[in-house]
Image: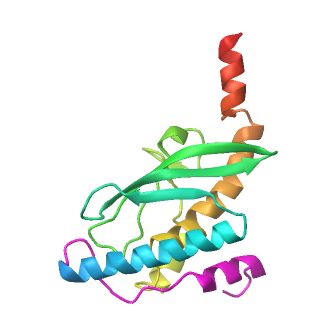
């Protein structure tokens, strides 16, 4: 955590670390891992709300906990930009981080792969590998998606690649 800003360090230290090294094929161990994932997500969400920094909602989209969907948002120039968020838990999880997808932004930035998967390879993947199995979904959101949104959304807005929903609605009415 050397070189990190104090706010990121503080946030990260408050997200519970996970202990169970299990993936979707590991039966009851995976169920235990899912419980730990939910605990970490709840703690992270509560911390964000208490700091007036609420920026995502996700839930498992299937009973196995291998598909997750939700929303994330970023406020830029006092306007809230909201996006669908989805990802699958890889079979090799937790050794492999989930690939976070923002489908509606597909093709709008070079820092994205086909299907709207955000680019996390250079900065986040080595960090994930170093902290496996202690990192989970909450950590991927905190250290992967949050900085990506902070870096990319202002550029996409300022370049006109994405428009605020109110701007889009008023241009459609004209």
The structure residue drawn at horizontal position 72% and vertical position 27%, both measured from the top left corner, is: 167
User: Quadrant where the C terminus lies?
Assistant: top right
Question: How far from the left and from the top, in percent, is residue 144?
Answer: 56, 66
Q: Which residues are magenta?
A: 1-26
Q: Is residue 69 left or right of residue 71?
A: left
Residue 12 covered by magenta stretch: yes
Residue 112 covered by magenta stretch: no
- Kindly report the secondary structure that dominates the magenta region of the rendered protein: loop
Is 32 in front, or is 6?
Answer: 32
Is 111 in front, or is 170?
Answer: 170
Q: Is residue 71 visible?
A: yes
Question: How far from the left and from the top, in percent, is residue 153?
Answer: 68, 48
The structure residue drawn at horizontal position 59% and vertical position 39%, both measured from the top left corner, is: 108
Question: How far from the left and from the top, in percent, is residue 21?
Answer: 32, 85
User: Quadrant where the N terminus lies?
Assistant: bottom right
- Location of residue 46 by image quarter: bottom right
In the displayed orientation, state which residue is furthest to the right: 77
The structure residue drawn at horizontal position 48% and vertical position 46%, both measured from the top left corner, is: 116
Question: How far from the left and from the top, in percent, is residue 99?
Answer: 43, 60
Q: Is residue 118 above or below residue 7?
A: above
Q: Is residue 154 left or right of residue 100?
A: right
């Amino acid at each position: 955590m050397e070189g990190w800003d104090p706010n990121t360090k503080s946030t990260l230290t408050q997200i519970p670390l996970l202990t169970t090294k299990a993936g979707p094929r590991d039966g009851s161990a995976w169920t235990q891992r899912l419980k730990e994932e939910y605990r970490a997500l709840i703690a992270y969400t509560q911390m964000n709300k208490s700091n007036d920094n609420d920026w995502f909602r996700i839930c498992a989209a299937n009973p196995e906990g291998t598909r997750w969907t939700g929303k994330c948002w970023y406020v830029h120039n006092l306007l809230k930009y909201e996006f669908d968020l989805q990802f699958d838990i890889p079979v090799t999880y937790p050794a492999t981080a989930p690939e976070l997808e923002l489908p509606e932004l597909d093709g709008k930035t070079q820092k994205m792969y086909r299907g709207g998967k955000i680019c996390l390879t250079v900065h986040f993947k080595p960090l994930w590998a170093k902290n496996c199995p202690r990192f989970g979904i909450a950590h991927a959101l905190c250290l992967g998606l949050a900085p990506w949104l902070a870096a990319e959304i202002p550029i996409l807005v300022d370049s006109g690649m994405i428009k605020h929903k109110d701007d889009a609605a008023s241009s459609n009415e004209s």
